[in-house]
Amino acid sequence: MKQLKVKIIENKRIARDFYRMRLASAYLAKNSKPGQFVEIRCSEGNEVLLRRPLGVHRISDGGIEVLYEVVGKGTELLSRKNTGEMLDVIGPLGNGFDTRAQEHKSTSHKILVAGGVGVAPLAALAEELKKKKTRVTVIIGAKTGSHILCEKELKKSGCEVRITTEDGSKGRKGLVTDCLTSLLQAPNSQPPALYACGPTAMLKAIAKIAAEKRIPCQVSMEERMACGVGVCLGCPVKMKSGGYKMACKDGPVFDAKEISW
Ligand SMILES: Cc1cc2nc3c(=O)[nH]c(=O)nc-3n(C[C@H](O)[C@H](O)[C@H](O)COP(=O)(O)OP(=O)(O)OC[C@H]3O[C@@H](n4cnc5c(N)ncnc54)[C@H](O)[C@@H]3O)c2cc1C
Ligand code: FES
């Protein structure tokens, strides 16, 4: 992990409040893995003091991409940055997904479940898995069709993609968990492993399904963060074994069955 000044190659609005930013950094490209994140300084002055964490969305030879939703001051400032500007970034941070973890190694079908902008870090994971010719299904859920991101890109990289929306405006009407349950009931299904990112309530519901069906499952916990490096104790995740782990340093990816939901 390093503090870097990186050049913005592109900062493009891709949907209503969603932007994709490409950052030039050979260091981040070489050292980042899916599920890790960067802490970005959104303003030069004192407008927003704390850095904002964003997941590594794509990794290429010359740098990384982040995909973000404008929800407040920090992301709003970020959306106004122009190509060619320099950005102060710390990263890569956190542990990332571990598809080689003991229970995950023997699974031949990886199911990635994304809630809203939670698809951002999962896209990097999907790309990595597809390079290894793994079967990947991505379930993307959102409130409405205009909040569904990355569908085209994921299909292009060879993933099977299922869409769910709460209002039924795109794909199947309902929640990602409905879609996941049907997928797991399909006859002749290969042994699956689950990887999920999205709102905590969604992750909790997925963890329950995984526990009932005894499927290995990793979740990326997007707790609010401050320091991003385990110092301020501001991002605790309660563990079943007792005590807390810090999402920024010990996570953000955890084995779902270790979390006290
Ligand atoms: C490890 C990690 C990875 C993340 N990756 C992404 C990503 O790839 N793309 C993306 O769009 N967002 C991501 N987030 C969330 C992102 O960091 C926040 O949306 C951002 O910090 C908000 O900053 P802001 O100044 O715009 O809004 P603020 O003014 O700080 O907050 C605006 C609103 O958003 C809520 N909010 C802020 N942070 C979070 C959070 N972490 N979880 C839930 N609600 C929050 C606040 O409660 C408030 O209601 C990630 C968070 C973490 C911890
Ligand atoms: S954000 Fe400071 S300990 Fe995690």
Image (cartoon, helix red, strand yellow):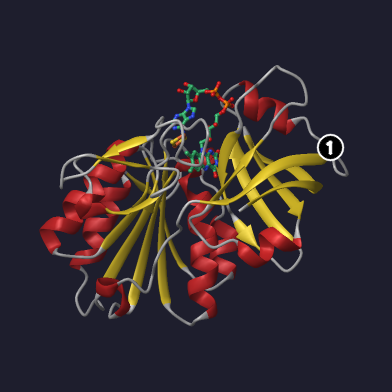
Q: Nearer the viewer, residue 124 or 103?
A: 103
Question: At 43% from the left edge and 79% from the top edge, which residue is drawn?
Answer: 134
The quadrant where residue 50 appears? top right
Q: Quick one: SS at disc 1?
A: loop
In this picture, residue 173 sits left or right of residue 128: left
Question: At 76% from the left edge and 43% from the top edge, which residue is drawn?
Answer: 11
x then y, percent, for residue 169? 44, 40
User: Dividing the image into 4 quarters, which one contains the C terminus?
Assistant: top left
Would the CB of label 1 be found within 8 Å of ligand 1? no
Residue furthest left in the image: 212
Q: Disc 1 designates what residue?
A: 82
171 w.r.t. 161: above or below: above
8 w.r.t. 201: above or below: below
76 w.r.t. 122: above or below: above
Residue furthest right in the image: 84
Q: Total number of numbered labels?
A: 1
x then y, percent, for residue 185? 18, 66
x then y, percent, for residue 39? 60, 40
**Residue type highlighted by circle 1:** Asn
Residue furthest front in the image: 231
In this picture, residue 111 sits left or right of residue 61: left
Q: Nearer the viewer, residue 55 or 196?
A: 55
Q: Nearer the viewer, residue 148 or 136?
A: 136
Residue furthest top in the image: 47
x then y, percent, for residue 60? 69, 66
10 Å crowding of disc 1: few (<14), some (14-19), many (20+): some
In this picture, residue 185 sits left or right of residue 129: left
